[in-house]
Amino acid sequence: MRRVKYRSIFFYLIIFFCISFTTVVTSIALAIASECKPKSIQTSPEKKLTIEKGKSANVTVKLKCKDDSPASGVTVETKVLKGNKNISFTPKSSVTDDKGKAVFTVTGDKKTEEENAEIKFTADKLNTTLEIKVQAEECTLDSIKTNPENKLTIVIGQSNDIIVTVKCNNGSPAVDVKVDAIIQNGSDSIQLSSSGELTDENGKVVFTVSGIKKTKKEAATIKFSADNIKTTLDVKVKKEAEESTEISSEEETESADTDEETSETESTEETIEEETSEEVEQVEETVEESASAETVTEEVSEESVTEDEEEISTDTTETTSTEEIIKCKPKFIILHPDKKLTLEKGKKANIIVRVKCKGESPAVGVKLEAHVDKGMKYITLTPKSAETDENGKAVFTVSGDKKTETEPAEIKFKADKLSTTLEVKVQAEACVLASLTTNPEKKLNLTEGGSSVVTVRVKCKNGSPAVDAKIDAIVQGGNGKVKIAPTGMLTDDSGKAVFTVTGIKKMSKKDKISIKFSSGELKSILDINVK
């Protein structure tokens, strides 16, 4: 009995000492944690939050110690500095968890007007602020405009800013909307600073276009789009010596309503002043067209020819002007789409063929012949030939009859001695995006100043590569320590898009940098480390 009694006492003593030891250790750990003074405070989102009226959003406040470890058990207090009537939030104060985080909920009560609401978060001697904008309702995109609006002329080696403004259907600026910019024509003549940017609080985003090479056949074209709305801007690139000529030509075009025609040379001006008959003026201007091509620079000649043909078409009889234009020998042949067309089996698409004269004026009444050089079993083309209209255009229709295998079909278009080809790829069915993967898959290590390539691959639901799918790339975090180029591009025939990632500055321990690649509803996150 005594042995049993002693054993029981010994057992309870052991339990007592274990509990006491655990209590002491816990107390010491809490004491150590409480001794850590927070050295940094950060909110997520970091600087600004935009919410709709009646909606709520979470704001996470994160505290860290000097060694970047989480500051747990610290009280974070909040205070609304501006816009008490616009927002409400809960709780008024909160204690950070074991990860050093405290979560608050903000609700938009009333639309903010000229000034945004502002909340101040305080922990110990640290504080930070967060701007909050409350929108009246969900923004339905209504309009997108560029400044300059229709056409921009730049000089080789120089750059110009393009301001894109996006508005909601209620007239308010569309904030944080992704605007995509794609060079449709003339990619060898111009360069864009970015292929996609987010609008600011004024609904605006700025792109920079640079002149690389002189545009010859036609102006380069940039398409700006946001969701389902879009606009285009023509960009003409000139040599520096031709800049003054272009300016004077534009001034002459603007004054054409009051003056019948302003010539490029002094001798032509005297000739036009002496002529009083409108019919004689047209004859002189027609003669001037051929003489001008030999005496003035090529660019001035091109502008003169265009203006002369426009004058002929409006002031002379229809028969005379048609005869004059038919005499023009085709110098350029342009397709839209430019080089390649992808369509689904059983679907149709139009191909616009444009023919131009030497002065870039439309070549009217020119016979265009179309022939399928490759893949006759895959596509059907109609008509076999067509004449260009008053705009120098002819339209052909191609149908996808069968899925192209290893090699796409090819159509050859011929006008006089000119010819060009168009590749046509026929897909078996519409591509429903199913997967998006990156290579490397999860993490990319970079050195400061070094670069590496990231390959993004997108596949359709049927396993085939997603061709011409738009991939967006956004750097998350890092404050400029990582750069990616481009920020958006289309996949190739293999469903791939290649991006270049550069490590600008070495990361600190607290930095968390990643790149989000997305296409439609699909997305993939790649963590970045810069040493």
Image (spheres, rainbow, N blue to C red):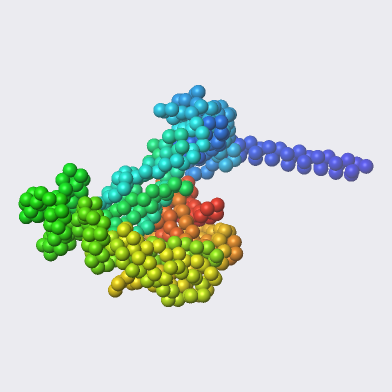
Q: Position of residue 55 (x, y in %)?
A: 56, 33
Q: Is residue 314 visible?
A: yes
Residue 128 vertical position relative to residue 478 in the rendered view, above or below: above
Q: Is residue 217 visible?
A: no
Residue 450 falls in image quadrant: bottom left
* Residue at image coords 45%, 59%: 490
* Residue at image coords 38%, 52%: 223
Q: Position of residue 291 (x, y in %)?
A: 12, 62
204 vs 45, left or right, is left
375 vs 414, left or right, is right
* Residue at image coords 51%, 75%: 377
Viewer-side residue, 38 vs 338: 338
Residue 301 falls in image quadrant: bottom left
* Residue at image coords 41%, 48%: 230
Viewer-side residue, 516 vs 199: 199
Q: Residue furthest right?
A: 1
Viewer-side residue, 389 vs 230: 389
Residue 293 vertical position relative to residue 371 in the rendered view, above or below: above
Q: How many numbered marks does the figure carry?
A: 0
Report the quarter where the N terminus lies. top right
